[in-house]
Image: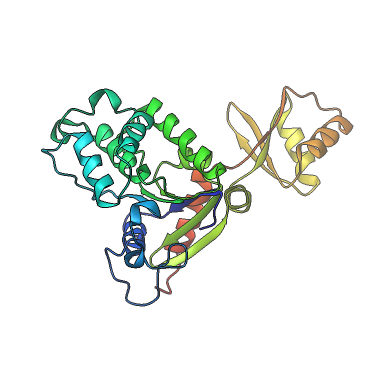
């Protein structure tokens, strides 16, 4: 995972995303291989909260503590200035409820508290497992802006999520795993370009004749009832020229790029059809 970028960690349930993150943090021992943070194992880090901030789905702070006291305890354990507690509570939007006991928190508030704990040591590395779980729309937007700004500062941000729309907005790079195999390790835009379905949407009063003309030029044309023609294999500019040369009237000519969700499902589907085990 490189600094200065948000890396999205994708895979179906049971693929091993959470287990991989636990191995990074020394909570699960790998059968083989190593997981290093800044070239060192997590267990070797002195005051680890200053090196890596983590939010796991299994995080379970003491429900009887207040949010402020929970963070103060963490700060003391890593010799972090107590003034930092108020800063991170403000950052995640919990300053007004810092006095409340954690047991009274909603799921979204608990996730915000977990994020506050991850940010407490102002670490250069963040490892976040499903951080948007339970957050409302505003909370998701604020988290997106926060993580993008932290990556812009040169930090390393690893985030897992099943929300493909959000991942497409936040991730610069993707790592995709399934059934114990690494399926992709590439830029988000390139992943979508390679595995998503891009096409040119054409609407015309003469769809049948136009479709035949476009197919004659080597394209693949799909008729979508009530919508028009979806053309694959020719850029929009060439579709426009071909249409004009044939004298066909146009009501629409637009380019549609594939989505991350579509690309991801396509890759996972290919893996599922592989019978090699």
Q: Position of residue 63 (x, y in %)?
A: 13, 39
Q: Position of residue 201 (x, y in %)?
A: 67, 33
Count of numbered circles on the image:
0
Specify the farthest residue to the bottom.
32
Location of the C terminus by quadrant is bottom left
Specify the farthest residue to the left.
64
Q: Is residue 16 above or below residue 200?
A: below
Q: Which of these two is toward me, 64 or 214?
A: 64
Along the horizontal axis of the image, is 90 left or right of 264? left
Q: Position of residue 209 (x, y in %)?
A: 76, 34
Q: Residue at x 53, y 60 (%)?
A: 184
Q: Is residue 250 above or below residue 130?
A: above
Q: Residue at x 34, y 37 (%)?
A: 84
Q: Residue at x 82, y 39 (%)?
A: 238
Q: How is the image coloured?
A: rainbow
Q: Which of these two is toward me, 141 or 70?
A: 70
Q: Report which quarter residue 22 is drawn in.
A: bottom left
Q: Position of residue 23 (x, y in %)?
A: 33, 64
Q: Which of these two is toward me, 236 or 246?
A: 236
Q: Residue at x 24, y 48 (%)?
A: 59
Q: Report which quarter residue 113 is drawn in.
A: top left
Q: Report which quarter residue 273 is drawn in.
A: bottom left
């Amino acid at each position: 995972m490189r600094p200065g970028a948000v890396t999205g960690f994708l895979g179906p349930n049971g693929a091993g995303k959470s287990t991989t993150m636990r191995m990074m943090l020394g909570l699960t021992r790998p059968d083989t291989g190593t997981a290093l943070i800044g070239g060192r194992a997590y267990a070797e880090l002195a005051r680890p909260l200053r090196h890596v901030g983590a939010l796991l789905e299994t995080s379970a702070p003491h429900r009887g503590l207040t949010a402020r006291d929970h963070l103060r305890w963490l700060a003391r354990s890593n010799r972090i200035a107590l003034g930092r507690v108020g800063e991170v509570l403000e950052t995640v939007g919990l300053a007004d409820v810092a006095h409340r006991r954690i047991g009274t928190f909603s799921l979204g508030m608990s996730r915000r508290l977990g994020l506050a704990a991850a940010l407490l040591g102002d670490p250069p590395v963040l490892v976040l497992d499903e951080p948007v779980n339970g957050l409302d729309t505003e909370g998701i937007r604020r988290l997106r802006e926060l993580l993008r700004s932290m990556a812009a500062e040169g930090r390393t941000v690893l985030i897992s999520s099943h929300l493909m729309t959000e991942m497409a907005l936040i991730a610069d790079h993707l790592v995709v795993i399934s059934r114990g195999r690494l399926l992709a390790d590439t830029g988000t835009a390139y992943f979508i370009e390679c595995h998503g379905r891009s096409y040119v949407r054409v609407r015309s009063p003469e769809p049948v004749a136009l479709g035949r003309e476009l197919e004659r030029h080597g394209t693949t044309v799909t008729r979508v009832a009530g919508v028009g023609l979806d053309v694959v294999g020719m850029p929009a500019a060439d579709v426009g020229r071909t249409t004009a040369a044939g004298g066909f009237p146009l009501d629409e000519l637009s380019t549609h790029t594939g989505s991350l969700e579509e690309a991801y499902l396509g890759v996972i589907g290919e893996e599922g059809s592989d019978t090699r085990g």
